[in-house]
Amino acid sequence: MSITDHFYKNRVAINVLANSIANAQEIYQTAEGFALIGVLSKDYDNVPSAVHAMKEYGSAINDAVSIGLGAGDSKQGKVVADIVHTYPGKHVNQVFPFVGYTRAKAGTDKSWINCLVTPTGQPGYVNISTGPHSEQGEKAIVSIHSAINLIKDMGGNAIKYFPMKGLSTKDEYQAVATACGKADFALEPTGGIDLDNFSDILEIALAAKVPKVIPHVYSSIIDKETGATKTEDIQQLLTEVKKLVNQYG
């Protein structure tokens, strides 16, 4: 299976976390395969142990593994790239400055690599200073159109827009979605997405004709007692995905 097989009608895949292989399997089955399941590099002591774990997850869910940084931690950028060198996976989360490096380390164009940019308070503009050094200094704020073209040059597949804080950055998010739609470029809204705002956030992207959307839904659907992602919430998300994709085509 390629990553496209995990998109419902080639448009939407949800990205969620799992706290065990068993939880990942439950999520994957409940989502009917239309999910990418995050395994965070930050949870492992070194690259070999992360690779081993991710391969085990992958063997249980048709390699629908999303290789994660861990809360967008820029210090994990090189770690993720080193993991990808051995286990390219299907979906990779990366900060802006490491996208080209990660594509080279992957040695294939089959791995989907997103690119983390952050809101600026200005609709139409994003911050690309998301690396371990650049995030400490003066922000590099560029137009969303320039960011998309730079990501394409680096071999990235999508903008990861984080942290959105739900709909509190709605105007900025709308501008990003509109630009992605015009550029025929994928979008991954992330941060503060829950069962209440999921439909609105997804609908904005689909209405803007974004070709592929991967909403990341994390802590809001995790059982606080067990740490596992709740399958009943996955079912609700899938129902909304099908409804909106069928509506917008």
Image (spheres, rainbow, N blue to C red):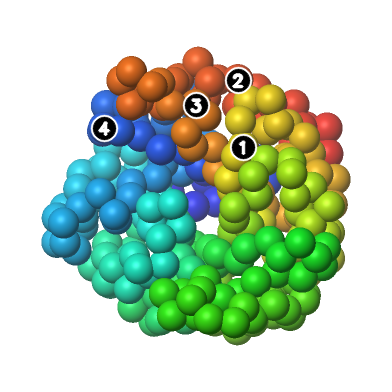
Callout 3, which amino acid? Ile
Single out the mark in the foreground, 2 or 3: 3
Q: Would you name the residue on which mark 3 appears? A: 221
Q: Which image quadrant is residue 20 in?
A: top left
Q: CA distance from mark 1 to mark 2?
A: 14 Å
Q: CA distance from mark 4 to mark 1?
A: 22 Å
Residue 18 in the figure: left or right of residue 96 = left
Q: Residue at x 79, y 39 (%)?
A: 203
What element does badge 4 sit on? loop
Q: For the residue carrying disc 4, how many other residues have a C-alpha within 10 Å: few (<14), some (14-19), or many (20+)? A: some
Mark 1 vs mark 2: in front: 1
Give the residue displayed 68% in from the left and 61% down from the top.
119
Q: Earlier in the sequence, mark 4 or mark 2?
A: 4
Quadrant containing the C terminus is: top right
Q: Secondary structure at mark 3?
A: helix
Indicate the quadrant where residue 8 lies: top right
Residue at 77 percent across and 35 percent down: it is 200
Query: Disc 2 marks which residue?
Result: 236
Disc 1 designates what residue? 193
Disc 4 residue type (three-letter) = Ser
Q: What residue sits right under mark 4 in the picture?
A: 20
Marks 4 and 3, the one that precedes in the sequence: 4
Q: Is residue 104 visible?
A: yes
Label 3 packing within 10 angstroms: few (<14), some (14-19), many (20+): many
Q: Amino acid at mark 2?
A: Gln
CA–CA distance in space, label 3 to label 1: 9 Å
